Image (cartoon, rainbow, N blue to C red):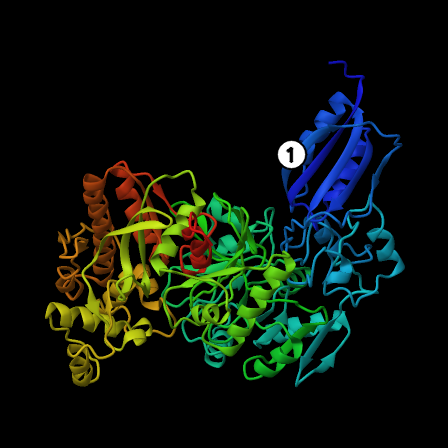
Amino acid sequence: MDTGTREARRWLLSGRVQGVGFRPFVFRLAQTHGLAGWVRNRAGDVEIHAQGEHTALTRFGTALFANAPPLAQPVLARQEHAALQRLTGFAILASETNAPMQAHLPLDASVCNDCLRELADPHDRRYRYPFINCTQCGPRYTLITRLPYDRAHTAMAGFTLCPACRAEYENPADRRFHAEPLACAVCGPQLQFYSDEAGIIDDATQALVACVAALRAGQIVAVKGVGGYHLLCDARRDSAIARLRRLKPRPHKPLAVMFPLVGDDGLEQVRNAAIVLQDAAQRLLDVARPIVLLEKRSPFPLSPLLAPDLNEVGVFLPYSPLHHLLSSDFGAALVATSANFSGEPVLTDNLEAETRLAPVADAFLHHNRPIVRPADDSVYRVLAQRPRPLRLGRGTAPLELDLPFTLARPLLAVGGHMKNTVALAWERRLVVSPHIGDLSTLRSLEVFEQVIDDLQRLYQVRATAIACDAHPHYASSQYARRAGLPLHPVFHHHAHASALAGEYPEVERWLVFTWDGTGYGEDGTLWGGEALLGTPGAWQRVASFRTFHLPGGEQASRAPWRSALALCWEADIAWPSKLPDTALLHAAWRKRLNAPQSSAVGRLFDAAAALTGVHTHSSFEGQGPMLLEAACQGEAQPMALPLARHRNGILETDWAPLLPHLLDEQSSVGARAMLFHASLAQALLEQALQIRAEHGDFHVGLSGGVFQNRVLTELAQSLLVQHDFDVRLPERLPCNDAGISAGQIFELQGQTV
């Protein structure tokens, strides 16, 4: 074709193309290629008309995707030839507001390198300004009040731009063109430091100085970030951490650590404390700046109280300019744990934080930019050679996924009770909320309902049906029943299996092992060790574990000794423990009073932790299994556990032969812990082999909170691969209950909802 021929083309781009600097990017790209035309927002999409030489247009079209801004995720909705127009130059037109809304919410993003350079430049007008941002960085989801994403619809509406900021905001060639959180020290948010000792300090420079001085003095400071408050203290100082644990109270649960950005890649100080492999390094440096669990170095240079008796520590890098300034000025690692209580969402309001955190914090570093909705830190762990999410939060959620089917009407899924998230789905789109928390407190329930309302309002989609967990007593299920919409209960482990299957729509047949604590099963018992064969909406339970009755019911989740007693009583084996008199408990157990039947592998882990002497009483969920995993040493020859068909036709693995070995004090704790993990991995393989022999081929999936355990997961994966199974683990959704809401949506595919 003659490259001198002029022609016109039009693109419609969907995906995440608003709030990410996409229009100024298109403007500059068109100028680079000598094109005339225009670009505009069109509801939730971006529409582009460009005209010029054929070759230039082709290169321009390729660069729209290849060179898109880092925060953008453009998707080609339509490309077509267009009629030439009388145009000179390229323009950014006013938004088209009459088109149907196809919103894609921009996510909170860590401060970019360009802004960091300005932050550190004494000659820049934003030198050390704690709220510096541009179109490629800064808060988004946590400050949007409604769409379209304009400054007037954000928490920045109350801050009037000064002339210098206004000029940047209105200049299409500036990287701050329509950066909605745009501000400077003249017109933007300000810091305030407060302590009983220092009083109120409104000067930003002095507030930072006072905050760093308090941290160096061993004090605990509540610092307001992007999605909520953190409690900060010196990560090297035992006394400060011990006091934080006592006052929060958080006696044992690991504490996250924020390291200053030091060295060529920023990870120099992190590497001094932990082993950082390439995939973990990439995740740490990701624009979301999540917490990543890393193996501690030995000797560990920080306080042993950060993650007592565990081999890993949760690490993240500063993500906001305020955190960069604090960590850089302090010069060393800081504890940065979410400012919340009892699994609640993180605190966001200045006055509420000061009131509720008064018993814990010695000082407060506030700012006056409102946080519209909380967003806790995201958490990742390397499992089977890849960082996988354990919690979706700031920078990673709302998570948008494509549905492999089309919904007849919008559907809301309200998830489970623990680690709650909610999901909204319509047409072929699925949106999963950030982590909300455990729905056992009033504040958690308030945020739960706020997030449900926010998602529907922001995406301009109103659900006409609702999915929930089949457990009748979950707070989320009770909300669903009150909602007055057509209700679709989904069994807990079906949702676990479907969440994994939804990530791999190309797989036609699955065997998914859904191992977790407990969840309501089809037969009314507490499942948790299931193998489900089939596809979403058509699962068949084909294997499980020998059941046992949990003395005290739900109390067993925080008392591993109860699970240990349950197994010993069930198998008629004595446990020479030093527990108080359990005669009354045993009598109630024998009569099946508050002793529900369960097949939960999570409770087997609890029992093993207690029987080996690793752990008997928990202060947080999962403490026993975490400590048991950390205790593993060496290699172990797995014990072959009996596998037989139960009278209900389901294959059952019997855990009882493990008990004498777990109690054998002639063997080290590390060896017994490893034996337990290896034997369960072998039991999983034996179930898979037997089911394949009976039912034919399938892909194997591992889903449920137990598969947060790296030792078990990697042993099981390795054994399965050796026997020619194709094994899949979650990549984008957490394998724990945070993935339940998405699983409830995927489970309903093919049903009329």
Q: Is residue 372 above or below residue 10?
A: below
Extreme-left residue of the structure: 572
Q: Residue at x 79, y 57 (%)?
A: 122
Position of 685 with respect to 136 (left or right) is left
Instruction: Name the secondary structure under disc 1.
Output: helix
The residue pinned by badge 1 equals: 66
Q: Nearer the viewer, residue 261 or 64?
A: 64
Q: Is residue 294 at all visible to an observer of this figure?
A: no
Where is residue 433 shown, x and y percent of the image? 54, 59
Position of 205 with respect to 623 (left or right) is right
Quadrant of residue 720 in the image?
A: top left
Q: Nearer the viewer, residue 144 or 425?
A: 425
Q: Nearer the viewer, residue 163 or 196?
A: 163
Q: Is residue 136 above or below residue 667?
A: above
Q: Is residue 717 at all visible to an observer of this figure?
A: yes
Position of 726 with respect to 338 (left or right) is left
Q: Quadrant of the N terminus?
A: top right
Q: Nearer the viewer, residue 290 or 121?
A: 290
Q: Residue at x 69, y 35 (%)?
A: 64
Where is residue 200 shown, x and y percent of the image? 73, 81
Q: Residue at x 28, y 62 (%)?
A: 527
Where is residue 376 shown, x and y percent of the image? 55, 64
Amino acid bearing label 1:
Ala
Label 1 CA crowd tier, 10 Å (few <14, some 14–19, many 20+) = few
